Image: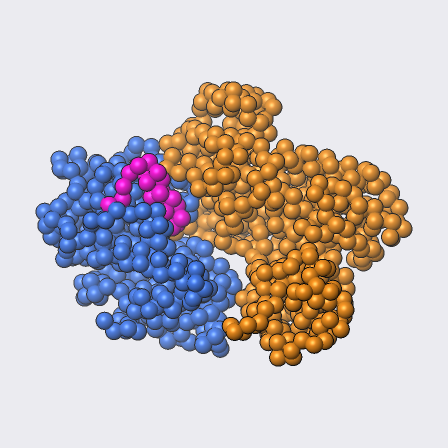
Amino acid sequence: MFRIGVDVGGTNTDAVIMQGRSVVATVKAATTRDVTSGVQQALSAVLASSGIAAEAIGAVVIGTTHFTNAIVERRHLTPTAAVRLCLPAGAALPPMVDWPADLLAVLGEHVYLAKGGNEFDGRAISPLDPDEIAAIGRDIRAKGLKAIAISAIFSPVDDRMEAEAAAILAREVPEARIVRSSGIGRVGLLQRENAAILNASLIALAEVTVDAFADALRACGLTCRFYVSQNDGTLMDTETVRRNPVLTIASGPTNSMRGAAFLSGHADAVVVDVGGTTTDVGLLQNGFPREASSLVSVGGVRTNFRMPDMLSFGLGGGSIVTSGAGGVTVGPQSVGYEIARKALIFGGDTLTASDIAVALGLADFGDRSKVAGLDPALLREAKALMDAGVEQAVERSRVSATPIPVIAVGGGSILLADRIGGLEVIRPPNFAVANAVGAAIAQASGEMDRVFALTGGLTREAALAQAEAVARDRAVAAGAVAETIVVVEREDVPLAYLPGNATRVRVKVVGEMAV
Amino acid sequence: MRILDEAAIEAIAIGAAILGTGGGGNPYIGRLRCQQELKRGRQVRVVTLDELPDDARVVAVGGIGAPVVGIEKIRQGEECLRAMQALEQLTGAKMDAVIAFEMGGSNSMAPMVTAAQAGIPVVDADGMGRAFPELDMTTFSIYGHVSAPAAFADDKGNVTVVQAAASEKWVERIGRATAIAMGGSAGSAIAPMSGAFLKRAAVPGTLTQAQLLGEAVLHANRLHQNPVDMICAREGGRRLFEGKIVDLQRRLEGGFARGELTLEGFGQNTGERGEIVIQNEFLLFRRNGVVEAVVPDLILVLDHDTGHAITTEVLRYGQRCAVVGLPCHPLLRTPEALQVIGPAAFGIADVAYRPLSSSQPG
């Protein structure tokens, strides 16, 4: 069976066909405004170039920035009601308290606080009042809202109140899409709630987009299942994407890192992805991108999504190089997609990083004669600047002194030296389409993050085992083959000041998708 | 007297989290709560110790509980206010001003919120000049204040008053147990102190110190200058180490997060090893096995690049840190203070306190 990976980027939509562990065909097509026709073009082109019949394709995985862009551009979002079960606690900071005004204007400020929620040990803060929730539901319906996000204090510890409230609201507002925070994030109410609200506002778009992707596949004769890749390098089936589109955010950099791991055969490495404008540097551990521990802002909203811990800086193939009294500079300004017109080697008048690479003989494209007369001192200085920037980023990404390789991917990675900071640089085959490869090889994951009270005979080990069992169940529910599941993260954090050995346990597992 | 604006509050949150030496709660939530009070049209007014009349009645307030509860169970908002009002009822007199127990992420902000709600000022001072894990580890208690009657209030309307206590430690013990019963967090207020007492016993000027420190860090971030150097220069601090976290052990003992952090040096410390002992806050720093700083002096763990504080609950493997030592206030270095907040008080029996020398005398 063959598998297709698609990466929908800002400039290009890449597609690859893979058979087992080998890349059979690759193609780059232009990204289109409607996204879907670009996907369709890439799919039909890669099928045509490989000569493989559509019936032989077992699965398609799509990585897309569509939902990230919707949030960032405040487009296609559904006005959403935010219902928090918390009273009498929680009133100090209502939902969406720190959101940007322009995003609030699009979603409307439909905020409801109700009785409910739990203490850290599972006790109720106050009982849920079904009449109160029903009245909120009637108000939401009267406003004509079609999306609802429900959060409850400590719902990662006990999600029953969120579930009960969701059932009541579903009866009162049958046409609404309802999102529960417990299904979408970890401890940290404001960030989990933010994720739930963003998610609810994206669901209508997700339904349209998933249908459009399905149409694109069908138009190419592809009848297999398809998946969308998630921010942490694992994938979701289309039902999950319809329910949790917000989890696709930041899947692009993740896919390139995972693809780099696959193409190079290294599971522990620093990945340097050089595009046209920026370079993304991240660390691979066990074949997965290292997650960011700090809060990640999406379109001005603080969230606690699983996202790769990436360092981005302004160096790419199109970076503009200047020299003057202050010395030589490279980037962060870039000619971007206009490189084919503006760079010296393409007959333009702007000195770019690509011109430097060609003049130094590191790469051979465009018209080399156009850069023959450049001052060797300038070339040396510009190259030294680029190397220093990359070296610094690589050094910052490392977490131990153990020498690990640097994997260079992305179209602009020709700029990179053969050694960075004393580390070997590996340029795997098909490095330019590493992100589409990453999409093709995405895995399924499951995660558990909960506070346990280690009392009454419950040991730390038993709590970790319980958490792992839940994570495994969730991975299987997400499509993983049980026998292939491995634990990739496991941590326990004792909670200060609380007796009863209250401990926060987080376990994440991944496994191969059943194809 | 001065009035704080949003920018001042942001700077205080950053600076106080740095002075919090790893503890003191989540700075972002504290900052949002203050800013909410401003949005409601309330004012955060700050008075200096000098401006405080000797007979002013000043109440110390703050949150008591676990930081992780603080980021999940957002408060009702008036817990500290109700604790304060319970004391007003009991003593039959209004409070004139509010003061912080400690500088730290959210506990430097809690008194500002209460002050805004009550329409009274907050004093530019606190009881630690940093953060410590327990309620009795303040210069107030050390220099003779009797905290009982003390009040503890939750989100639901429950208020507990500790009418009398056998010692300051008992106020902490009973308060801690009460906070746990109330859901892992509560607002607390202790018996009022006089302006005259605070002029003698409080660590002065710490809100302003936090604000200037926060502003310096933000300024350095904007100009891409080295924020850690900026912090050292401002506070007379010493760069103790720069390194990556290569090991982090945390365990629960007696209701505290204890542990040890191991750093592998880079830059000037390449080839060296740093170790930090943790009990909610950072207590002791060793370089290559030799103690270089110990509580009550301040041991800061900062993000190497941004200079922002890394609080103990968000430490993780691989973080690149700068460790900075700051001399504590002289009020924390007296023999009676060291009995309560010296190394031995934290079970570090084999290390005698040797004051950290400032890099910039005076």
Looking at the picture, tell me which residue is in the foreground, B76 or A503.
Answer: B76
Percent coordinates x, y for residue B109 in the rendering: 31, 48
Q: Magenta span has B38?
A: yes
At a point 81% along the width and 58% down the height, the residue shown is A22
Q: Which chain is orange?
A: A
- Tell me what residue is drawn at x 47 percent, y 20 percent: A135
Q: Which color has been applied to chain B in this rendered view?
A: blue
Residue A367 location (% of width, % of height): 77, 69
Most common secondary structure along the magenta stretch: helix
In this rendering, the answer to whether A385 lies above or below B314 is below
What percent of the width, then of the height, locates residue B280?
37, 56
Residue reaching furthest left?
Answer: B55
As drawn, which residue projects farthest toward the bottom? A377
Q: Is residue B283 visible?
A: yes
The residue depicted at 27 percent of the width and 44 percent of the height is B44
Q: Which residues are magenta?
A: B25-45
